[in-house]
Amino acid sequence: MKTPLLTGAALLALTAGTTAAFAASKAEVLTNYANIAEAKYEDSLITAKALQAAVDALVAEPSAENLEAAKHAWLAARVPYQQTEVYRFGNAIVDDWEGKVNAWPLDEGLIDYVDASYGGATDENAAAALNVIANPEFSLSGKAIDASDITPELLGETLHEADGVEANVATGYHAIEFLLWGQDLNGTEHGAGDRAWTDYAAGDDCTNGNCDRRGAYLKAATDLLVSDLEWITAQWAEDGEARETVLSDENAGITTILTGMGSLSYGEQAGERMRLGLMLNDPEEEHDCFSDNTHNSHYYDGLGIQNVYLGEYVRVNGEVVSGPALADLVEAADAELNAELTGKLSTTMMKLGRIKTAAEAGFSYDQMLAQGSEAGEALVMGGVDALVDQTRSIERAVAVLDLSDVAIEGSDSLDNPTAVFQ
């Protein structure tokens, strides 16, 4: 018996039914979003534990080789963590926590010795040159502080953002970065910080004094980073508060995804992390300024935005976490827009990839920020313009999905440039 041919109308009806059957639901999209968050934070925890082991080895047996191993472990730990930043904006539990582990820029004189050019205390920050490592006792906010034992509690509960000053960053990746690399005194010339391994040496081999306390600070900061990442990873696990919050209201959950994508793309990355530093020609505005790793921070921030939209993340062990994505919802509402946004995300990664490739070839991000560097400005603005452009398509996605509560963060460097110099 011959199978009857389907009429055009019947074929269209069947195709529509099949499409509906395979269309992703908001609940499935949000579950995959939470699964990817859990995987990213778990990878951040795994790599932070590797950093912890390397720091323990450095403090136990200081050497040039062990310092270099700790630096490599820090760089590796940044790769998965930067991809989590798209979860900050919109997820209140993440945004409230994030300052413990990724706050910047910092007044490094709070922590350790600095070059004379750094200066001292300022009207804005009385603790800018406190140097906790050199001072087992000091006064803070009019209160005597016993810092003879440098512990995670001292760093997290007493020193971090002391006096309510955001630049008093005592914990997290960037405090650890400073302790491993030291200050970058190269300005907009090539070169990162160059801390000597003997800053951790014992006895007469110790340079710059207080090597035992410097090791204690580094270890306490790394231990605290690990415990903070354990906490946030648990929030995205089964029954975790962050997961339950994002799954509890489907429209609010989808709003959260778009808020994170748009705010990181526009105000945070394009504005505060890229355009602002270029406007000021200031290497102090680099995200990873001590290690000259900023090109990677920008790249993996961008990748985090892309993999949330596409619903796919490649773990540090090579495993792929994937599933229904926001892209599926946009595709169902407006296939042309989905193609547009997917293409723009790809263009952004190409532009950020050019910055990364140039830096790895020897044209460091510091140099790109230098006044009069036409090549540097072209590279950085290529990334800025692509991020701004993809944000416009993210805003269109908000409209086609009929969402009204998406608040994308701005930046004076993009929205009101004259204010930057006032």
Image (spheres, helix red, strand yellow):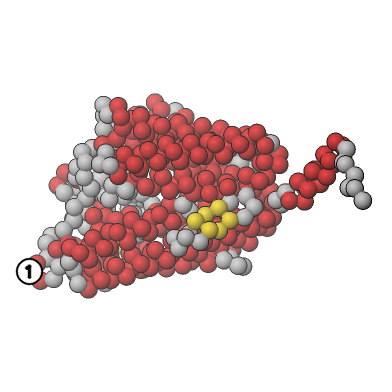
Q: Which residue lies most toward the front here?
A: 1
Q: Which residue lies most toward the bottom here?
A: 60
Q: Which residue lies most toward the right here?
A: 1
Can the viewer see residue 126 in this picture?
no
Residue 226 is left or right of residue 325, and the answer is left
Residue drawn at (57%, 37%), measured in percent from left and top? 341
Q: Name the image quarter holding the C terminus.
A: top left
Residue 41, given in percent of the width and then of the height, sits at 48, 61
Three-letter amino acid code of the residue under disc 1: Asp
Residue drawn at (48%, 36%), measured in percent from left and top? 347
Q: Quadrant of residue 147?
A: bottom left
Residue drawn at (45%, 41%), measured in percent from left and top? 349
Residue 84, given in percent of the width and then of the height, sits at 48, 53
Q: Quadrant of residue 331?
A: top right
Mark 1 surroundings within 10 Å by alpha-carbon count, few (fewer than 14), some (14 through 19), many (20 or more):
few
Exactly how many numbered labels are in the figure? Answer: 1
In the figure, 417 relative to 26: above or below? Answer: above
Residue pointed to by mark 1: 204
- Seen from the viewer's position, the closer of residues 414 and 420 is 414
In the figure, 418 relative to 276: above or below? Answer: above
Residue 285 is left or right of residue 12, and the answer is left
Residue 81 is left or right of residue 250, and the answer is left
Residue 188, given in percent of the width and then of the height, sits at 23, 37
Can the viewer see residue 67 in this picture?
yes
Residue drawn at (45%, 31%), measured in percent from left and top? 385
Residue 257, given in percent of the width and then of the height, sits at 59, 48
The residue tagged with tag 1: helix, strand or loop? helix
- Seen from the viewer's position, the closer of residues 2 and 99 is 2
In the figure, 138 relative to 26: above or below? Answer: below
